[in-house]
Image (spheres, rainbow, N blue to C red):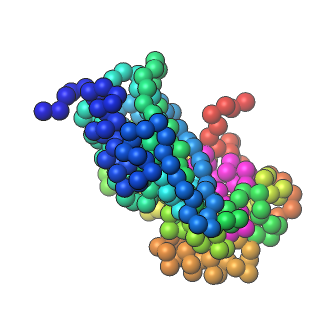
Amino acid sequence: MAKEKGGGEDELIQSTFAPLASAFPGALGLKDDCAVLAPPPGQDLVLTTDAVAEGIHFFSDDVAADIGWKALAVNVSDLVAKGAQPLVYLLSLSFPEEPRRAWLDGFAQGLSAAQSAFGIVLAGGDTDRRPGLLSVTVTAIGSVASGRTVRRSTARAGDLLFLSGTLGDGALGLVLRGDPARRAAMGLDEGKAEALVARYLRPKPRVPLAPHLVSYASAAMDVSDGLIKDCGRLARASGLGASLDALRVPLSLPARTALARDFRLIETVLTGGDDYEVLTAVAPDRASDFRAAAAGSGVAVTEIGRLAEGSGVKVFGAGGQPLEIGRSGWDHFPD
């Protein structure tokens, strides 16, 4: 019978995490202090790291499998926006107390499902115990053809802006996860509300889109802190300004239902974050080919704006009238 507690660090590593690394020989069975990774021939390695922390990125009573999935997904999303194919990841866990075996099993199940979905495998990591709240840090490594990494800073004036998938589901899902009673005010039935919460709990990075970004994007980044904020980052890095058409932003049926009931939720959709979609700048003469390539990979992309000389992000609504938005997105260190 499995112990209620995790069973000590060495047992925890071998019983819970070593199976997740078994497909990568360079992980050395998680029996060494380091892993070994050789870049694929003709490829550059792309590295990113993000942490998810209890009380900030997930609720204390979230299902462990969802926490595992999300911790990996938010990092893979960064790789995808660079045009990189996921390879391996490192995982560091800080526990406030020794974890329960049931929690560990669920967390590992979420990681395993995410690994299979995203084509990535565990290479190593660390576990420790410290005061405070649970924190999960992932460093993800991918590969892209040498010299072909898609950057934020290389967009050009006149480029069209495309967004993958749909926007606002994660942010609206967070609202409902924190206050399920908001469902009625949003005009949502139980199924639509659950769909939004699911998008918050288990974001889906657009891995099939990565090679098409390499082929067609002049710049790209993932949308994690809110569309307006992240669009501003891309535009600023490229020395440009941007305009967004709020009415062209792609929405899921549950999100459309909520906005039909209360259009003020458009601010949540545009600034709430937790989307993990890809914002892509594409030259106008390549836009049709990009749409077709993305569709062929099973990822919908929608034209939502344009880059131009200037600065800042302008958002327009019905009749081309400017929309007044009170904030641009999430910030860990607001002024």
Q: Is residue 47 left or right of residue 19?
A: right
Which quarter of the figure has residue 239? bottom right
Residue situated in front as seen by the camera: 82 or 31: 31
Tell me how many marks there are.
0
Q: Is residue 282 above or below residue 285?
A: above
Q: Residue at x 34, y 36 (%)?
A: 13
Q: Residue at x 61, y 55 (%)?
A: 46
Q: Is residue 94 above or below residue 288?
A: above
Which quarter of the figure has residue 306? bottom right
Q: Is residue 231 magenta?
A: yes
Pinpoint residue 80: horizontal percent, then vertical percent: 56, 60
Q: Residue at x 67, y 73 (%)?
A: 216
Q: Is residue 100 left or right of residue 305?
A: left
Q: Residue furthest right?
A: 310
Q: Quadrant of the C terminus?
A: top right
Pinpoint residue 126: horizontal percent, then vertical percent: 45, 33
Residue situated in front as seen by the camera: 53 or 258: 53
Residue situated in front as seen by the camera: 28 or 171: 28
Residue 14 visible? The answer is yes
Pinpoint residue 116: horizontal percent, then vertical percent: 37, 58
Q: Which residues are magenta?
A: 217-235
Q: Is residue 178 above or below residue 128?
A: below
Q: Residue at x 68, y 32 (%)?
A: 334
Q: Is residue 280 left or right of residue 241?
A: left
